[in-house]
């Protein structure tokens, strides 16, 4: 097993593409708990929301994954580690195994068994025991003749890639109970019995998954949830410097990435760092500053061209300098891969098997040529008894090729019946309008990045890069302009001309997340008009529409600079606009939200900001709002998060009662609360509420130094009594 874990493959899985894991490994942060709402957002939204994390909470080294957090004494049997695609979950698992095999960590463990779900998907036999499953994946266990020896060993089972599982895991129905390692059943039943503790109850279990799939395992079977958070800004630079040995070139690439915040944010994912390094090294060698990618689509288009060129050199033993001829000569391979990407994206599949390839006309006997389109775009792996499995190296690459396939189909008059049922022939305007509408209907942003790529590919500059794959056609600029207007109308929900006055109320059905993606779509089309409007509005002091508030919130969140103070009253807008602006409090130190007509519901947004790992908020003023006791309950959820950095909270004139005191009293006793000042004056707390707060001050975990009520400063009173 050690030999398998020593190397990491860049490209096709074969010796010549292997790199020593230690030479390129950049430490990833694994933290206890997870980001708020992480299961409900598209992965790119999670990346963009997390790019400014300062990680003041203590990271967990992957070797300490089964150790209880400081100050807690609990037995951790089963750990769920979440993280978006390409963030480094599997690499962390390999590093964990390698360190154990080399004697660097966890030497009290006798066996570590790695069981990737992508391999177990290929197990069709229903008559499996846990012993037989281990023999198939780890044949060296043939020497273990006496299965009772399992009982005397300390073992760790690692189930990698739950999101890739096609196995039925049913925890809610009483399945067959297995207690012996030789008892047979389906693979799904064997796995559920192991996780439930019926089989090998002393064994430790580590499961990795993308966030959206993690809820397949009920919470009662998980001892600890952790999250892989990828690279912070210094780690991005560390990765580029390890990957690019030439210091001058590394500096140039890092400098360029920082000029495009959307690209630099994406480098939170290690895989995207690798894509960026691959592209920029090649482009800078050509010394053509006009072609340096500045948008996501440009980056992926260059990556496709570079990998196609590498495939030519490797398999056809020729170097084609003319870009158009290069793409033309590889037309068939690229189109079949794009068709596969589109069809499987519609189904929500990210792993493919031989039958999936055949459906798209891909000859599985020549699949290594298709996987040669990467180092890396498309991967082929032998994961179980030499059976093959295929995937794109990252979901974003699949989404890019899927978007390309749609453009190709439209330009070649091919039907898109699966995307637009019943419509045989559509205009480009109608196609793009439908794509925008479909993305807005998605609850988890399933088509967000696909839409951004679709609009980006239709730019004239990107179509020129893709000549040889796309036919020469009339300009799509008019359709893009109409789509840009349609997106703005969706944001503004108006039918008249777009001006900075007479705005209608924003369509309330569009969530903040969807609105943010529409803004990013405009930037992908190189339409910065809304950002320019914001600059004008800020200077003029005119009223902000809710749509403008979404733009401003996004600009604040991705800004390099943390605001010293954010005062919501400074922006003339309605209640809907204030709700959208409130998410900006994550990127400020002091948030003044007083006299803003906020309600208990508004406090949910504030609580989410307090729980965000990238929050900088230390001082919060909510005074003179009808937030009521229910609003305080929401705030307390945020205060108890390990990510919360709040030290000052002012809640004067908020219509609070003794109920709020009860909730706050509990929060002040918690380990996580960092509050130093709490002002509750001018509320109806009653004597019983004040007494609850007074009792909380005596708790050793309470860090409060200043607690103000209508009865005065309780902290000072306590000191005088002593």
Image (cartoon, helix red, strand yellow):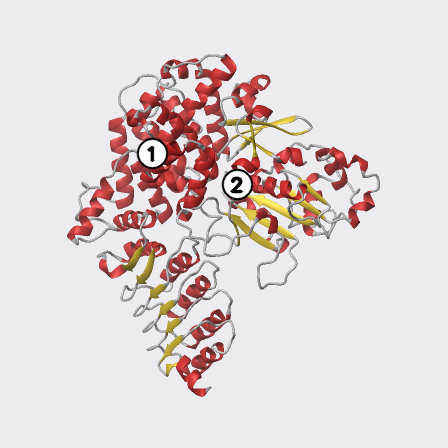
**Which residue is label 1 attached to?**
295
Q: Residue at x 35, y 77 (%)?
A: 683
Find disc 2 in the rendering and name its residue: 88
Check disc 2 and report its element: helix, strand or loop. loop
Q: In the rendered image of this protein, does residue 242 appear above or below residue 545?
A: above
Q: In this view, does 155 lie to the left or right of 543?
A: right
Q: Can residue 406 be seen in this view?
A: no
First in sequence: mark 2 or mark 1?
2
Q: Where is residue 152 in the image (x, y as percent from the top left)?
A: 79, 50
Q: Residue furthest front?
A: 247
**Residue 564 placement, left or right of 367:** left
Classify mark 1: residues with Cα within 10 Å, few (<14), some (14-19) or many (20+). Answer: some
Q: How many marks?
A: 2
User: Looking at the rendering, which quadrant does residue 485 occupy?
Assistant: top left
Quadrant of the frame with the N terminus: top right
Residue 145 showing in the rendered view: yes
Between residue 694 and residue 489, name the one nearer to us: 694
| Residue at image point 37% right, 83% down | 711
- The answer to which of 721 and 357 lies nearer the viewer is 721
């Amino acid at each position: 097993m050690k030999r398998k874990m020593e190397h990491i493959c860049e490209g096709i899985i074969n010796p010549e593409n292997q790199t020593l894991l230690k030479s390129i490994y950049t430490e990833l942060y694994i933290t206890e708990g997870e980001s708020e709402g992480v299961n409900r957002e598209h992965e790119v939204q999670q990346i963009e929301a997390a790019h400014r994390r300062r990680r003041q909470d203590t990271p967990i080294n992957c070797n300490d994954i089964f150790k209880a957090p400081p100050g807690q004494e609990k037995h951790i049997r089963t750990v769920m580690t979440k993280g978006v695609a390409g963030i480094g979950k599997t690499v962390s698992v390999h590093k964990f195994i390698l360190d154990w095999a080399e004697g660097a960590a966890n030497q009290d463990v006798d066996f570590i068994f790695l069981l990737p779900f992508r391999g177990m998907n290929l197990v069709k036999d229903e008559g499996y025991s846990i012993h037989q499953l281990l023999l198939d994946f780890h044949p060296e266990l043939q020497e273990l003749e006496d299965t009772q020896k399992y009982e005397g060993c300390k073992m760790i089972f690692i189930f990698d890639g739950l999101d890739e599982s096609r196995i039925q895991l049913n925890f809610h129905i009483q399945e067959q109970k297995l207690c012996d390692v030789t008892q047979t059943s389906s693979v799904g039943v064997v796995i559920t019995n192991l996780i439930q503790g019926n089989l090998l109850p002393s064994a430790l279990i580590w499961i990795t998954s993308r966030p959206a799939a993690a809820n397949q395992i009920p919470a009662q079977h998980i001892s600890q949830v952790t999250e892989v958070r990828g690279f912070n800004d210094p780690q991005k630079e560390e990765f580029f410097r390890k990957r690019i040995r030439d210091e001058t070139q590394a500096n140039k690439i890092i400098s360029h990435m920082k000029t495009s915040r959307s690209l630099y944010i994406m480098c939170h994912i290690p895989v995207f760092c690798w894509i960026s390094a691959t592209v920029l090294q090649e482009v800078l060698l050509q010394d053509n500053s006009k072609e340096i990618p500045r948008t996501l689509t440009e980056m992926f288009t260059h990556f496709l061209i570079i990998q196609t060129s590498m495939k030519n050199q490797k398999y056809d033993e020729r170097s084609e300098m003319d870009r158009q001829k290069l793409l033309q000569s590889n037309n068939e391979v690229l189109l079949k891969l794009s068709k596969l990407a589109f069809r499987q994206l519609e189904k929500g599949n990210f792993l493919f098997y031989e039958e999936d390839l055949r459906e798209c006309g891909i000859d599985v006997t020549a699949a290594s040529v298709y996987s040669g389109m990467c180092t890396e775009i498309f991967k082929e792996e032998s994961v179980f008894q030499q059976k093959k499995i295929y995937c794109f190296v990252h979901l974003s690459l699949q989404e890019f090729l899927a978007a390309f396939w749609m453009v190709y189909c439209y330009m070649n008059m091919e039907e898109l019946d699966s995307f637009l049922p019943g419509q045989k022939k559509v205009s480009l305007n109608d196609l793009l309008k439908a794509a925008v509408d479909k993305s807005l209907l998605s609850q988890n942003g399933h088509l967000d990045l696909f839409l951004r790529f679709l609009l980006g590919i239709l730019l004239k500059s990107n179509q020129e890069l893709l000549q040889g794959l796309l036919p020469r056609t009339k300009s799509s600029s008019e359709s893009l302009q109409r789509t840009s207007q349609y997106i703005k109308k969706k944001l503004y929900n108006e039918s008249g001309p777009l001006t900075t006055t007479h705005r209608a109320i924003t369509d309330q059905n569009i969530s903040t997340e969807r609105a943010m993606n529409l803004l990013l779509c405009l930037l992908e089309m190189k339409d910065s008009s809304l950002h320019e409007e914001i600059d004008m509005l800020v200077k003029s002091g005119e009223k902000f529409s809710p749509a403008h508030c979404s733009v401003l919130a996004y600009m604040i969140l991705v800004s390099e600079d943390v605001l010293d103070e954010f005062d919501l009253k400074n922006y003339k807008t309605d209640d809907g606009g204030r709700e959208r602006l409130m998410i900006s409090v994550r990127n400020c130190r002091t948030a003044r939200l007083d006299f803003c007509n906020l309600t208990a519901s508004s406090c949910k947004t504030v609580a989410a900001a307090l729980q965000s790992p990238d929050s900088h908020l230390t001082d919060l003023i909510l005074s003179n709002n009808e937030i009521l006791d229910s609003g305080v309950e929401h705030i307390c959820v945020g205060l108890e998060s390990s990510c919360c950095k709040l030290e000052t909270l002012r809640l004067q004139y908020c219509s609070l009662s003794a109920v709020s005191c009860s909730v706050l009293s509990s929060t002040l006793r918690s380990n996580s609360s960092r509050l130093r000042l709490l002002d509750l004056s001018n509320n109806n707390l009653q004597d019983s509420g004040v007494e609850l707060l007074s009792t909380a001050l005596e708790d050793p975990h309470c860090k409060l130094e200043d607690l103000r009520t209508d009865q005065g400063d309780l902290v000072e009173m306590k000191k005088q009594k002593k």
